[in-house]
Image (cartoon, helix red, strand yellow):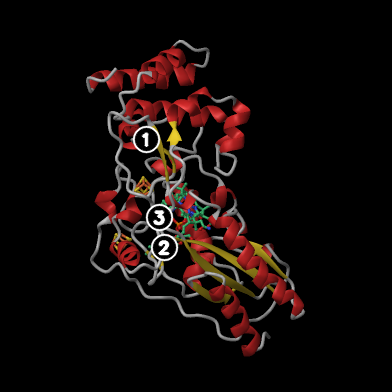
Amino acid sequence: MLSVQHWEELVGLGLESGLVGVGSCSARTWSSNRSRIEACSAKGLARDMEFTYRSPARSTEPQRVLKNAASLIVGALPYPPPVEFLETADMAPTGRVAAYATDVHYQHLREILGAISNRLKEFGYRSTVVLDSNAVLDKEAAYRAGLGWYGRNSLLLNRHVGSWCVLGSVVTDALIPQLSVPVPDGCGGCRRCVPACPTGALAGDGTVDANKCLSWLLQARGEFPPEFREALGTRMYGCDDCQVACPPSTVSIRRGHLGAPLLIEPLSLIDILDMSDDQLLTQFGDWYIADRDPDLIRRNALIGLGNSASEAQEIPVTLHRYRNGPDALLAEHARWAIEQRRSRGSA
Ligand code: B12
Ligand code: SF4
Ligand code: SF4
């Protein structure tokens, strides 16, 4: 059993390194979550996602990560919200990236959890870091560790920073003496995220329908569903609308818990459509892209050109090049974009 003194040292280490919360929970199998994932799959809500859906038994048994695991030490790392952005006709067509992907937040969290894990090893325990993999349900670990509640937008909401945090754990064979208590629901009667979702992907019971969620559709293989192309706007990776609409998350911005939004280089949609496969995979290598297929990035950029308010002269040139190009999937998305611009009176 880890001593109280050692536990307090680990919590202090996490908080001093920037975590907004550190808690712990048991590594015993999370059976109710397994049934819930299976139920989501059975209802068709998972579309073609793999992740934790690939093996619900594995993702709900932390002991498969580390033999004889007794506990998880869970951390939440806050990140700045998205920058407000309005594209105008005289600007170059610009792609948008969700706030969580504007910096290497997962890497920062991995380093902090790595330091906690190393300290545990110095105390004589075994431990390993897991985050954003298929091995453990990160939100469930955080919920059990008392770091927040499940919002109707399906995200884990922390009382200080709302959902503007990434989550991860250290799985260890150390038994933690003071296991945390889950936080009660904080959504109450609020339902703002449900109508704020541009595609109606939120059922309102904490589940997301991946068939409609832009965040998944941007990553998924094949044709982008025509009925959601206009709603995509100029997003290139991720979607923040169900967080931007969320009062606890917005309040955390006003209270200054998150720091200033990160300004990133504008993402030129024309440049993206001019890049080689290698250039695309180098520049966007941190993104999850199905099969590492750079055409999926091009597909999304073509839809972005169709929706862009920009009147840059390169747009029709690029779209016609792709419409007449050899790739049937990209040609179809370019045709859609040309039609979309024409219907708005743009070139
Ligand atoms: C697959 C995945 C996605 C998928 C599916 C999302 C989903 N809700 O399942 C897609 C690609 C759509 C996605 C999008 C996003 N994701 Co994501 N994603 C994951 C991943 C890899 C697995 C999630 C998972 O297991 N889903 C399976 C389903 C069945 O789980 P679930 O919906 O959470 O259901 C659980 C609850 O319902 C709970 N539960 C049980 N009983 C009950 C009862 C009630 C009443 C309720 C409400 C819930 C509940 O049990 C279920 C099983 O655990 C995790 C990382 C990880 N390894 O955990 C990141 C993760 C969830 N994603 C994250 C982020 C940041 C995002 C985005 C915000 C990114 C963006 N800006 O685009 C969006 C948000 C979309 C949204 N509203 O959820 C963060 C969330 C951080 C947080 N504060 O919650 C995670 C935890 C990554 C990380 N390590 O930080 N994601
Ligand atoms: S990420 Fe976007 S599309 Fe997905 S549920 Fe949230 S608001 Fe809807
Ligand atoms: S918008 Fe309201 S209902 Fe949705 S997650 Fe936030 S607090 Fe909960």
Tag 3: Cα neighbours inside 10 Å, few (<14), some, or many (≥20)?
some
Q: CA distance from mark 1 to mark 2?
A: 25 Å
Q: Vertically, is 188 above or below 1? A: above
Q: Which element is circle 3 on?
A: loop
| Amino acid bearing label 1 | Thr
Residue drawn at 49 percent across, 38 percent down = 219
Position of residue 230 in the picture relative to residue 64 (left or right): left
Q: Nearer the viewer, mark 1 or mark 2?
A: 2
For the C terminus, the quadrant is: top left
Tag 2: Cα neighbours inside 10 Å, few (<14), some, or many (≥20)?
some
Residue picked out by circle 1: 234
Residue picked out by circle 2: 259
Image coords of residue 333 (percent x, y): 41, 22
Image coords of residue 245 (percent x, y): 28, 55
Q: How many marks?
A: 3
Report whether the residue tagged 2 is closer than 8 Å to ligand 1: no
Which disc is residue 285 wearing?
A: none
Which corner quadrant of the figure contains ligand 3?
Answer: bottom left
Report whether the residue tagged 1 is closer than 8 Å to ligand 2: no
Residue drawn at 53 percent across, 75 percent down = 15
Res. 123 image quadrant: bottom right
**Is residue 292 visible from the viewing direction of this image?**
no
Chain-order first, disc 3 or disc 1: 1
Q: Kindly check if marks 2 and 3 are in contact, taking CB atoms under 8 A apart as contact.
A: no
Position of residue 242 in the picture relative to residue 42 (left or right): left
Q: Which element is circle 2 on?
A: loop
Tag 1: Cα neighbours inside 10 Å, few (<14), some, or many (≥20)?
many
Q: Nearer the viewer, mark 3 or mark 1?
A: 3
Residue picked out by circle 3: 261
Report whether the residue tagged 3 is closer than 8 Å to ligand 1: no
